[in-house]
Image: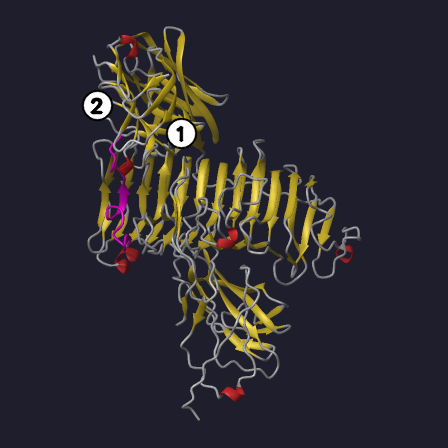
Amino acid sequence: AVDLRTALTLPADEALDLAPGLVIDCLVRLDELPTSYGYLVVREGQYMLRINSPDEGGQFAFFVNLGTWEPRVTSPVRAEVGVWYRLRAGWDGRQLTLEINGVRKTTQRAGLAQPSTGELRLGTVAGVLDDLRITNPRPPLLRIAALQQDRAILRAGQDERLYATVENIGTFARAAAAELAGEPGFTVAEPARVELGDLAPGESRLVEWRVRSAEEATYTAAVALMTGDEPVRRVGRTVSFFAEPLMPRPPQVVLDEPATTWYIDSRDGDNNADGLTPATAWHDFTPVNDRTLGPGEQVLLRRGSVFTQELRLRADGAADRWARLGTYGEGARPLIRRDWRLDQRCVLISNPSYLHITGLTVAYAGKGLIVQDQGQGRRGLVIEDCVAHHIEGLYRTGAHGIPEWAGLAGAPGDTATHSAGIAVLGGRPRDVLVRDCETYQCSWGFFAMGENIVVDRVFCHDNIVHNTSPHPAMVQISRSWLTRSLFHAAGWHASAGTMGIMLVNPEGFVIRESTFRAQPDSGSHDQGGIDFENEGNGTLIERCTFEHNAGAAVEVLGLQTPQPRAVEIRGSRFIQNNLAHKLGPSEIYIWGQSPNPEVCCSYGVIEGNGYTLNDGVSWFHNDVPELAEWIERDNTGYATPAELRAAMPLNDHPVAEAGPAVWGDQATIALAGAATDTDTPVGGPLALRWEVIEGPGEATFDPPNAAAPAVTLSQPGDYLLRLVADDGDLWHADTVTAHRLPAGAQTARAWGWATNLDKEGWTDADLGTTLQVFDEQAWPTRAEPIRYVAGGYYIVALDASTTGHLLSPADLNLPAADVDSVRLRLMNSTNATTFRLRLLTDPAAD
């Protein structure tokens, strides 16, 4: 052991020179915390393992000098007195790694080591260093930052170019070579092996290959880097080819001959029956849970049913006989409604093949409809005409701000770590279609990953959840599509930022004819349309509309990991975005505030778009044009949105307006809905339909396809009704509450809180909640007090408060003697058992 109070130095030694493969491994115990920087192991001018100053947080950090000392890698572990820490710090030529007692952190860091004749110094800090081992093999090390492509979308049946720069970041390399290999169907023109000759340290060569695929497919391409015939490194990536014409090819459901069908009816079913006919339906999910559906088998839920239990199924259908989870009967779609708890889930589908899910509503849980591929690479899934709402709370640990949820985790059994209304995730799902679905009031509207994922005609909107509503996401997708979808306030408030959608590592992705609009300003970061979070190769955005978002329409980030490459943005409309003057402020923003070439490596083409700008907002801003190579050409600015729409007449979504909430004591109540369409030629005739999403009985609309019909409610209570307007290409929906009162009852004043963030004059006080900060965890976050209106609820969180209250100044205009009753509809998740309602009277009134 070495006492670090007095520095111990070792003379310069070539064996200690910084090189890829360097690892420092040691034990450290502190007797006192340093008042400034605490140095542990330092090679002058080359690398440094230290404790950050108290002003920087007091964590362990590791640096290498590649011309500059930053960026460092910093562990989330703060140094404490009297604790033994096992530290393992390393650099492999591309990234820094720092592991403290098993907690590992990495940072992208590539470049050439700087020469030094400096000594190695241990200390000084008040503590003990033990079991120090420095491993430094210093081999020749060839690297490529990425295997790149010329354009966003590679076409089957055509020769395409892949290229890379091979760089030697180690010691002298003799007879270097690079060889590209693929899989069956992926053809590499000769020579697949490119001889590079000798490479001195820091020397590089450009290599390129011509490749081809006869059909639409996704492959793994791998470059082997060699010195002579000795492999040095293997670099692989996903390569996707699309067929002509460029259009989605989703899976097609085939179920001509159903096999066994099980029926479930929450109103009239009986678990002691056989479940094989509507007359002998089961009552709940107990008899069917954890069952595997075979080819042609079905589980059908009766319309009008409300289930409070989780549904769990597996499916092993066949390409010519799909399995199905669907509905039967008339009336409202079946609702799987949980207890609005963080640790609950509505539906879990495990390892499905050839499964069709249709017609469900999932609500009030920490997780909605979750489809989990447990690494088996299953294919064939269609989710359509499903609704998810009030799926909330899972984001970063502790972020929700609900005292009753403290310490709770999401429901086990899947890899979902966020509250997604609909999620397809896991190993490598393939051939998936999510179509005609709606998600609102969800922390993450939807989440999708896999190969040949098609998200079509999805309406993701008004996900207003305080603290935990960042965005929907598509992650690690290849040869996939997002088409004809509408994102309206798809995220709202989260400590790490909000966007219309987040993309992570797309490898061949087309976003077409979709709209991203009205991302609100909640004070969060970003708040724009499309977020390229990091990584990926080949994304095409075309014929899309970005409108009135608080942040940039498109932002290309990266931050600590490489930005996406080969992005094309074409033929799209940008209408007055970046209202809050966020990043840029510009319509399209390329990040580069920390100009690391390993991170700021994006490139692409922005061509043939139209835009109308807000004051103080530019069209395009690139922080690092010397690193991120973007071509911007033939884009046109217009003075007004109307001029832009006239010049670029893309089809807009129709607008359904379900009208104001209605109250009445009669069974039949008039609705005041409306629907409009731009009547753009690519759309069809506007079709309207109403349905009941939730309520105690049935709802009948007359006429059924009118915007403003009369609705007959079968029994008193509160009904959530939905109006859908569909032009055959795009659609939109809106909801309204209808309240049938007991016969003879009248409403003096009612508050339905139908408009998000509008408290309708109410105030709250003495709730007892305060800002919570969680900055000592792997994903730091914060939780602001919960006191807002969203999704038809006035939501407040209370903590150790005996005087918390809501107050309305509204005048009921009623003589006190005439007040017969006050009706409240609420959900109590606190430990309080009594509530008090106080009506204030005016003694001066008659």
Residue at the image position 61 percent from the left and 39 percent from the top: 350
What's the magenta region? 577-596
Asked if residue 327 is positioned above or below residue 759 in the image, the reply reads above
Q: Quadrant of residue 201?
A: top left
Q: Nearer the viewer, mark 2 or mark 1?
A: 1
Tell me which label, 2 or 1, sits earlier in the chain. 2
Secondary structure of the magenta portion, mostly?
Answer: loop
Left of 822 or right of it: where is 126? left
Question: Residue 594 in magenta?
Answer: yes
Q: Are marks 2 and 1 in contact (CB under 8 Å)?
A: no
The three-letter code of the residue at mark 2 reads Gly
Instruction: State how far apart marks 2 and 1 are (Cα).
Output: 36 Å
Residue 438 position, x and y percent, is 50, 54
Q: Which residue is mark 1?
A: 82
Query: Nearest the camera: 264 or 688?
Result: 264
Residue 137 position, x and y percent, is 36, 10
Residue at disc 1, secondary structure: loop
Asked if residue 714 is positioned above or below residue 780 in the image, the reply reads below
Left of 419 or right of it: where is 694? right
Question: Residue 326 in magenta?
Answer: no
Residue at the image position 74 percent from the left and 53 percent from the top: 282
Figure quadrant of the C terminus: bottom left
Q: Which mark is residue 67?
A: 2
